[in-house]
Amino acid sequence: MSETDGEKVVSINDLEFEKNVSITGAETPLKDLHKPKEKKEKSTKTPKEKKEGVVHGGSGPAGGAKKKEVKKESGLGLAFKKEENFGDWYSDLVVRGEMIEYYDVSGCYILRPWSYAIWEFIKDFFDKEIKKMGIENTYFPLFVSEKALNKEKNHVEGFAPEVAWVTKSGDSQLEEPIAIRPTSETVMYPIFAKWIRGHRDLPLRINQWCNVVRWEFKHPTPFIRSREFLWQEGHTAFATKEEADKEVRAILELYRQVYEELLAVPVIQGVKSEVEKFAGGLYTTTVEAFIPTTGRGVQGATSHCLGQNFAKMFEIMFEDEKGERKMVWQNSWGLTTRSIGVMVMIHGDDKGLVLPPRVAPIQVVVIPVPFKGIDPSDECLKVVHQLQQADFRVKADLRDNYSPGWKYSHWELKGVPLRIEIGPRDIEKKQVRVVRRDLEDKAVGRSQDIPVADLVERIGEILDEMQKGLLERARKERSSCIATAYNWDDFMAALNNKKMVLAPWCDEVAVEENVKARTKCEGDGGGAKTLCMPFEQDTLPVVQDPLPEGIKCFASGKPAKKWALWGRSY
């Protein structure tokens, strides 16, 4: 399996960024990095008394109890705007939002609990679904012998630049170098040849959750392109092509569900071109996402039909019911932690992460708002218990060294879908204030007071509204970024306007390579390629099969054979 890399990734250098970001996420402004530190003289002014932040209870300083010293924190906000500097905004966000921590090996990142929990939600959903299909989990070694890796020529050529090799053990040179898996076809298929003897051994359907290493690239970007990443990779063998074809589309539908129903990210399903398909495979299907801010596509996940090529190379044969020896038909398919990065890019804003409720590690955070010595913490814990009993993921932030306002900003940065604020007046009125993360500050419905008696029902309704709303909003924006072009000038105009372009194409490898080269020279954002040939679907009503007679390829002028979706990509 493969994730096709694009021409250019919008990102700041991760090692430079690492120097500027502390383990807590606080960052030195880039413009101040090389300024000498100025010595500050001690102030002779009498410090002003700090006023308590007040919400839901009038104004004035707190009375009665002794004031708790509130920890003053700075640097909570993001240093960059999404629309102005997307690459730096994204790199800043994944650190400050506590998704990753930088590591001292370039292109490798620490997945912090906040992001790993999201991966677990994806894993749990997908794992449950494939087990319903009869697919079993397994685990194969990380290392690949050079002999096995080189057995399938087209496959190894496709991955050769990315393969990392182990050549030493201590101070001793190994007799033969050992590759670290970039994918596991060549690890698994010699074993498939041992396990499969007759038709009763089929189908063989296994999956593994693991890490892989792909080394060769210049611009690492957290989640989107890293040297080591987590994924699942499924490998299956069938007696017939029809069975293999059916599974390819069934797995692709599960990938669509992961993106659209869990991550609220719209995707386009389609088949890859000969240039872009998996090396050594028969054909590749894909779910393609799109980042409107950068005008770049992202390959979300792929489901490949490998045909019988690997069966031939690794001699994976079976005896059918008539006693004839035949080669199996094989598939492989994979989904990676790239999915998390796509979600962040699509939904994140200038305040921080915006997490869809179905994958948010915490769906609701409850924050007490003390006033005049009255601490609502006990009431907060009651609300937490009430919501936990209804199976919501909820947390009370009772830290007394941070102000309520600081907590609001902190949890907005982390993308928690709902915030509940409880002050003394809320207790009197037997209500709570609920604030949504997905709406702007002054938007209608962002903040609402809800009776405690109705809280469980309303929280469920609001979270469902948010999940659907995030997908609908992203789908609407994505649809506005699809243009149709029938000639080169219109194609380039749309491409340079950060659009995906649906265009009639002659389906020739040389023409696709030429388009990639021409757009790299003529455009202002790198070369374009086919993202996929979309399957007919409601979101792309112009897609027709077959094409109307007489339509020419937008690039070559030859008779067009199909619609292709083109774009720049990560």
Image (cartoon, rainbow, N blue to C red):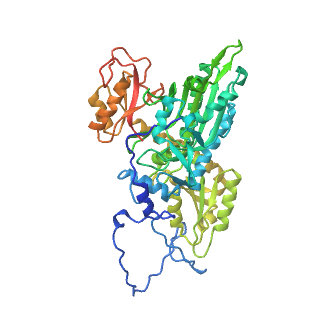
Dividing the image into 4 quarters, which one contains the C terminus? top left
Q: In this view, does 551 lie to the left or right of 318?
A: left
Residue farthest toward the bottom in the current orientation of the protein: 44
The foreground one among 232 and 291 is 232
Determine whether 412 is above or below 518 in the image: below
Location of residue 400 in the rendering, given as x and y in whole percent from the top left corner: 59, 71
Question: Which residue is at 59% across, 42% downward?
Answer: 143
Question: Which residue is at 28% across, 28% downward?
Answer: 488
Q: Is residue 233 left or right of residue 354?
A: right
Location of residue 387 in the rendering, given as x and y in whole percent from the top left corner: 67, 54
Location of residue 464 in the rendering, given as x and y in whole percent from the top left corner: 58, 44
One can see residue 340 in this view:
no
Quadrant of the image occupied by residue 320: top right
Residue farthest toward the top in the current orientation of the protein: 322
Question: Which residue is at 36% across, 14% downward?
Answer: 549
Determine whether 1 is above or below 109 in the image: above
Question: Which residue is at 38% across, 16% downward?
Answer: 548
The foreground one among 539 and 245 is 245
Location of residue 348 in the rendering, given as x and y in whole percent from the top left corner: 46, 50
Q: In this view, does 30 lie to the left or right of 239?
A: left
Determine whether 268 is above or below 365 in the image: above
One can see residue 399 in this view:
yes
Determine whether 549 is above or below 51 in the image: above
The foreground one among 398 and 125 is 125
Quadrant of the image occupied by residue 210: top right
The foreground one among 13 and 21 is 13
Q: How many labels does the image show?
A: 0
